[in-house]
Amino acid sequence: MRQITTLGIDTAKQVFQLHGVDAQGHVVLHKRVSRKQLLPLLAQLPPCLVGLEACGGSHYWAREITKLGHTVKLMAPQAVKPYVQGNKTDGRDAEGMCEAASRLRVRAVAINSDVG
């Protein structure tokens, strides 16, 4: 398998959709995983840029994914929307997040620290 350089993750309550591309922009990974499978799968991947849409639980996931050595780019939903092609599906959302994360013009949202 070619190395993933950018990964978009559409988060949900139980099932997450992943879309990963290599340095040339070719799709290397397009997969649905459960909440339990996500971190073990990401732990096996070499460090890459991970794009997430900023929402309630995304700050938790961003902190956990960062601990695994990946660079996380949290983005506002309105910044991701132009990159989602066609009707809204989890797969297309993950693909849009992957594309938006790779764009320098899309600004990142600061990851909140764990306060508790």
Image: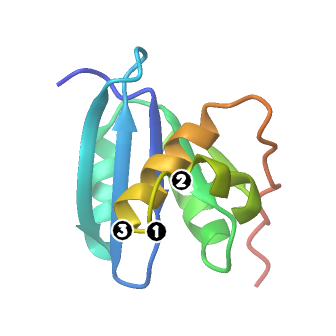
From where the camera sits, is residue 67 visible?
no
Horizontal side of 50 relative to 35 (left or right) equals right
Q: Quadrant of residue 78?
A: bottom right
What mark, if any, has residue 1 been given in the picture?
Answer: none
Amino acid type, callout 2: Val
Determine the secondary structure under disc 2.
loop
Amino acid type, callout 3: Phe
Looking at this view, name the residue that lies furthest to the front: 86
Q: Quadrant of the C terminus?
A: bottom right
Identify the residue under disc 1.
88
Query: Residue at image x 42%, y 85%?
Result: 13
Identify the residue under disc 2.
84
Label 3 vs 2, first from the N-terminus: 3
Query: Residue at image x 74%, y 53%?
Result: 79
Q: Dot 2: few (<14), some (14–19), or many (≥20) neighbours within 10 Å?
A: some
Q: Residue 54 placed where, x, y %?
A: 69, 65
Amino acid type, callout 1: Lys
Query: Residue at image x 36%, y 68%?
Result: 16
Does the residue at mark 1 contact the one at mark 2 (Cβ under 8 Å)? yes
Identify the residue under disc 3.
16
